[in-house]
Image (spheres, coloured by chain):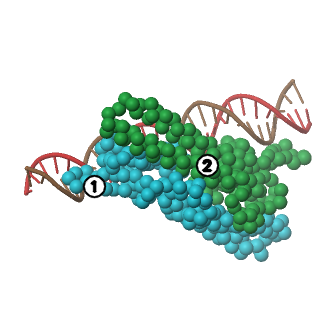
Chain colours: A green, B cyan, C red, D brown
Amino acid sequence: MGRLMEFWGFRRHMGRLWTILYLSPDPMTTTELADILQLSSSAVSLSLGELVHWGAVRKTWRPGERKDFYQAESSVWKLLRRVYERRELNLIREAIDAFGEAQRQLAETRSLLGQEERRRVDYMRKRLSRLTALSRAGERLVRLLVAGRMINPADLQSAEEEE
Amino acid sequence: MGRLMEFWGFRRHMGRLWTILYLSPDPMTTTELADILQLSSSAVSLSLGELVHWGAVRKTWRPGERKDFYQAESSVWKLLRRVYERRELNLIREAIDAFGEAQRQLAETRSLLGQEERRRVDYMRKRLSRLTALSRAGERLVRLLVAGRMINPADLQSAEEEE
DNA sequence: CAGTTTGTTCAAATTTTCTTGAACAGACGT
DNA sequence: ACGTCTGTTCAAGAAAATTTGAACAAACTG
């Protein structure tokens, strides 16, 4: 799971922490986590903070206890959606903007160029618009995923639980 | 594009190289590339090699010339598929195997445990099977993507070209 | 064949990212 | 209010990665 998460663009420890919490029936303290994963308390604090920020882990507490307890967000599906929404979509949007900007700049320069240069610029513009189109398609794809349509509920959501 | 690729798990330079090639109407030499992107020849050689390995760039040559020429694989769509196929799917499969292995080990231990421990182990097993189910679903999803079904051709493939 | 030119590989060096321990701050009980 | 226990932050250190320059190899030229 650590490897999956790492590949996915998060720190390895985030994956490990989440997994431990996910597998534990009861909420856990930072101390326990640090102990199990052999991490310093600072590392645990840092990564847990991020996990909470991404909504992958919830901070809870127990009546008598002073310590904070943590438990994993159990709906993996929800989690994936949130990540896609916050991160992938932004990235794609930025890319689309950048392509657009590049095209605009090329268009401005065009009239100042010689024939050969013009040919190159025109080619670039065509390619850029293709990249834009592809990115838009990607954006739509992610949006569909996030919206929860497109996927056969029997395939994915059935694996999810309560809550 | 560099950023996109980086996020996507490749080196930044790979994205930059590919983009330059993609935007150029004619194949280019390593020297030109190194020049434009301000990279050492070794960096270019290394990253280009990987791009070729991923099928994102093709090596070509021109009759009279000694140097190698490179051009971008223009079908981005094909490219994405290949990456998903080679990388994501493997990763997911490994994860599934690991989950299975973990479950098996827990099952073996079970009989040796006290009641409280048993409760934990049972919980873990349930969770593990859920993770497996989710991963399987992810695998199917990627497979559909790779197969090219699932996506409205009008959305995505129309943005692609010849070849 | 000797001399160029080009491409690749590799270890050293740089840069970047992670990790840690210590210092700080907040909350609680006495 | 003071001492203790937790959690967070931050700068210094460690580890990992990228980058580079040089050495090597291969392909071609005259």
Q: Is residue A137 visible?
A: yes
Q: Chain of mark 1?
A: B
**In the displayed structure image, the side of residue C8 where residue A67 appears, left or right:** right
Q: Which quadrant is the C terminus of chain B positioned in? A: bottom left
Residue linked to disc 2? A139
Please, which chain is the residue tagged with disc 2 on? A
Q: Is residue B136 found left or right of B55 in the rendered image?
A: right
The amino acid type of the residue labelled 2 equals Glu
Q: What label sits on residue A155 in the rendered view?
A: none
Q: Secondary structure at mark 2?
A: helix
Residue A37 seen by the camera: no
* Crowd band around label 2 with a 10 angstrom C-alpha radius: few (<14), some (14–19), many (20+): some
User: Residue at coordinates 68% horizontally, 47% vertically from top-left?
Assistant: A85
Residue A89 screen position, x and y as percent: 63, 46
Question: In whole angstroms, how far apart are the C-alphas of marks 1 and 2?
Answer: 36 Å
Using the image as rendered, state which of residue B93 and residue A127 is in the foreground: A127
> Horizontal and vertical percent for residue B134?
69, 64
Q: Amino acid at mark 1?
A: Trp
Residue behind mark 1: B61
Looking at the image, which residue is at 62% across and 42% down?
A90
